[in-house]
Image: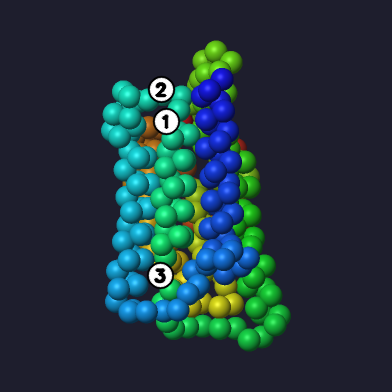
């Protein structure tokens, strides 16, 4: 029971931090956002912000590696591994937002009300599509709840099988594509926001590369075939679609 409660709390913390990231990035509602505060030394602010991005990126990448998971589960029950990953990821992201330094300068600012509204709507759509895309596969497995629930109910846990439903039939990484949209579709792009968007986008691009290498090792020819017929980020509308499922296990 403790494990399931831990899983729920980790999940709720992640949801709160994810919502906070959307508001932080878009400069809305929160007392501290990407542009909050009086800009100081540009070089110092850049160094701190890049350091925060590296801390988050390294945590996110290292803890996702199978070798790290194997070491972690020697001291932590296996069913808590994913929830712990989400909890530590949330802490790293929260640190980034709290310690972020404002930077002077504006890259672009859209004055036109219709265009600005369209960019706000597009950015909001990006933030919404991320969790929606996760629901198209196995949302509760991805965020650790399934593992803790199955252990609590004393049922065997089976990793989800490889599937390519809905958006995944048109692109291999709809969640990551939505993140790109969320970070870049804004009517006001400050230098501070630009550094955040560039850092997150670079991590996503590199992270996807290593994730796909891992998926090829794990799934074999099934994923290689999926790569061959399905674009990575930009959908090829009207073209060939990936099948809704595959037989290989994820």
- What separation in Å lies between label 1 and label 3 (alpha carbons)? 32 Å
Whether residue 101 can be seen here: yes
Q: Where is mark 1, residue-wise? A: 81
Q: What x and y, as percent, mark residue 237? A: 60, 58
Q: What x and y, as percent, mark residue 116? A: 65, 78
Q: Residues within 10 Å of mark 1 (few under 14, many from 20)?
A: many
Q: Secondary structure at mark 3?
A: loop
* Closer to viewer: mark 1 or mark 3: 3
Q: Where is mark 2, residue-wise? A: 77
- Left or right: residue 78 compared with residue 240: left
Q: Residues within 10 Å of mark 2 (few under 14, many from 20)?
A: few
* Closer to viewer: mark 3 or mark 2: 3
Q: Residues within 10 Å of mark 3 (few under 14, many from 20)?
A: many
- First in sequence, mark 1 or 3: give its number: 1
Q: What x and y, as percent, mark residue 153? A: 58, 15
- Asked if disc 1 and disc 3 are in contact, CB closer than 8 Å, the reply is no
Question: Residue placed at 46% from the left, 40% from the top?
Answer: 87
- In the rendered view, would you say 141 is above or below 150? below
- Nearest the viewer among 207 and 26 is 26
């Amino acid at each position: 029971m403790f494990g399931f409660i831990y899983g729920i709390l980790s999940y709720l913390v992640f949801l709160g931090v994810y919502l906070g990231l959307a508001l932080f990035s878009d400069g809305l509602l929160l007392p501290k956002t990407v542009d909050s505060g009086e800009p100081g030394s540009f070089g110092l602010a850049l160094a701190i912000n890049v350091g925060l991005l590296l801390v988050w990126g390294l945590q996110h990448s290292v803890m996702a590696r199978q070798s790290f998971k194997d070491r972690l589960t020697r001291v932590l029950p296996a069913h808590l591994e994913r929830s712990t990953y989400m909890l530590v990821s949330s802490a790293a992201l929260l640190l980034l937002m709290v310690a972020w330094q404002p930077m002077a300068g504006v890259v672009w600012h859209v004055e036109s009300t219709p265009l600005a509204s369209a960019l706000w709507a597009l950015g909001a759509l990006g933030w919404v599509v991320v969790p929606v895309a996760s629901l198209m596969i196995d949302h509760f497995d991805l965020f650790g709840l399934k593992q803790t629930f199955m252990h609590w109910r004393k049922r065997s846990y089976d990793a989800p099988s490889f599937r390519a439903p809905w958006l995944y039939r048109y692109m291999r990484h709809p969640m990551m594509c939505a993140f790109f949209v969320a970070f870049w579709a804004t009517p006001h792009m400050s230098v501070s926001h630009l550094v955040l968007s560039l850092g997150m986008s670079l991590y996503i691009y590199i992270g996807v590369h290593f994730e796909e290498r891992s998926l090829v090792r794990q799934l074999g020819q099934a994923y290689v075939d999926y790569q061959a017929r399905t674009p990575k980020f930009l959908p090829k509308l009207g073209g060939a679609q990936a099948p809704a499922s595959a037989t290989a296990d994820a």
